[in-house]
Image (cartoon, coloured by chain):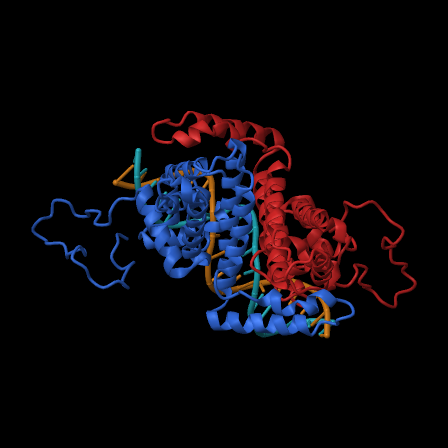
Chain colours: A red, B blue, C cyan, D orange
Amino acid sequence: VSNGPHEPRKPARDDAPLPEPPWSSRRPKPPARPPLSRDAIVDAAMGVLDTHGPDALSMRRVAEALGTGPASLYAHVSGKDELLELMIDRLAAGLQVPDPDPARWQEQVKECIRAVYHAFLAHPGLAAANMGKIPTGPGAIRTIDRLLAIFRAGNLPNLVIAYAVDVLMLYATAYAYEQGVYAERMSAEEGERYLQQIGEYFAALPADRFPNVAALSQELMAGGEGDERFEFGLEMLVAGIASQAR
Amino acid sequence: VSNGPHEPRKPARDDAPLPEPPWSSRRPKPPARPPLSRDAIVDAAMGVLDTHGPDALSMRRVAEALGTGPASLYAHVSGKDELLELMIDRLAAGLQVPDPDPARWQEQVKECIRAVYHAFLAHPGLAAANMGKIPTGPGAIRTIDRLLAIFRAGNLPNLVIAYAVDVLMLYATAYAYEQGVYAERMSAEEGERYLQQIGEYFAALPADRFPNVAALSQELMAGGEGDERFEFGLEMLVAGIASQAR
DNA sequence: ACCTGAACACCGTTCAAGT
DNA sequence: ACCTGAACACCGTTCAAGT
């Protein structure tokens, strides 16, 4: 089995493999499929994730998308963990972080954390893998360095800056993970209905045993549509951090 | 196959099955193993998690601990997701939340969030399962209700209370997840060495490309031992929330 | 009603063998 | 050096069959 029938979905392109002319029978089996590489594997993994969802992101599916077997990936990547790290680093490398403007540093920080949040939201499955690991890839380092520059324009103690970057990154990642789990299980309409059901359940709880949940059932369910809840936590954190300026 | 040879590890106890006396041949095969139940399954799952770690927490291992096959669990539990929810609810039910003391509400909130954090830290694997789900079990509802009581003593708008509980719970859960992933992969000594290596890597980065990471390499690695970083974020959040009092 | 053995459709990773 | 088929040791879940 060479290749060919493995990827019939994509439309023909200029670099599509031509039929082998019988007279130039020098190389009987040229590997028309591009050779494997770390980048090609990350490309394929991103494609699998975006089109089939986080549950489909397996070494086997990625290999299948490349027209090979799962064992072939291990020549370029030490395992699934490293592949996820490479995917996260590609995500980080794509983030745009502005040059620091001292007068607007708080707003700039919020913009960056929103960008991190939305990036992980766009590729569910990466947020979970980003937790518990200290980023060391070039893309992540670049992003963190530029984010640190903004914080340094805010006249904060260095230790506060370091902790602040950490906690804000965790916040964005964790929130994206949560939203991803939530979105993965149901469509927007189902989510609406689910939230309403939970709200009714809370409101119907025996008020003598759970008086506060019953009293606040409305508010506990509010703001589920947009980014209001995310913005609330972001606001609280940045305000608290800003209060540490010297 | 009845039971008996499936659990040869534990020492003999008073309720160990005695050899069948041949003269009382009424019931040839009394089910000496206690019948399955939701509680028994949750017990066994907690045992598997605590003694063998989160990676070992599979339906098959839980069934094995109960001396049966995995299919038997599905008569009492709809699947692994529900089992995890039941485990989380047991965790929540064990949390102690004090009666509200209006003068100390901020400190009381911090105590509660610390308790949530430490509870998830003690049972790694549950934190990840707690994200993206709205808790509805009796244990979780009870805990949330008592936590809401403390917030209501703080004279905050109802919407702020609702968002605050949410964001603080997410913070505690996410931080515990992160710490759990970190602790799972290495011992305390290995963690120490790992952090030091990362610190050296950061300090050795080309200062012209990553000036801020290089300059702050010390601070970026600080406070990894204790709960300083967790406390920092908790402080920022509670301070920000308290500033919303009317 | 509760339990079970066996199977289904997957995983990540390893390894000897090929080129 | 790079790639591969086949296998290993697992998963969660289903289902017909038993009692």
Taking B136 as reference, is A4 left or right? right
Q: Is residue A11 above or below residue B228?
A: above
Q: Is residue B139 above or below residue A167?
A: above
Outermost residue to the right: A23
Question: Where is residue B198 shown, x and y percent of the image?
Answer: 61, 70
Q: Residue at x 51, y 56 (%)?
A: B230
Q: Residue at x 64, y 52 (%)?
A: A61
Outermost residue to the left: B23
Question: Between residues B75 and A176, which one lies in front from this camera angle?
Answer: A176
The answer, for residue B20, to whether it is visible in the render is: yes
Question: Where is residue B225 shown, x and y percent of the image?
Answer: 49, 66
Question: Between residues A224 and A22, which one lies in front from this camera angle?
Answer: A224
Question: Where is residue B16 shown, x and y percent of the image?
Answer: 19, 57
Q: Residue at x 63, y 74 (%)?
A: B200
Question: Between residues A196 and A141, which one lies in front from this camera angle?
Answer: A141
Q: Residue at x 88, y 65 (%)?
A: A25
Taking B68 as reference, is A45 left or right? right
The answer, for residue A97, to whether it is visible in the render is: no
Q: Quadrant of residue B19?
A: bottom left
Q: Is residue B12 above or below residue A170?
A: below
Taking A179 as reference, is D3 left or right? right
The number of numbered badges drawn on the structure is 0
Taking A154 as reference, is B110 left or right? left
Q: Quadrant of residue B244?
A: top right
Question: Between residues C14 and B175, which one lies in front from this camera angle?
Answer: B175
Q: Is residue A201 above or below residue B173?
A: above
Question: Where is residue C7 shown, x and y percent of the image?
Answer: 47, 48
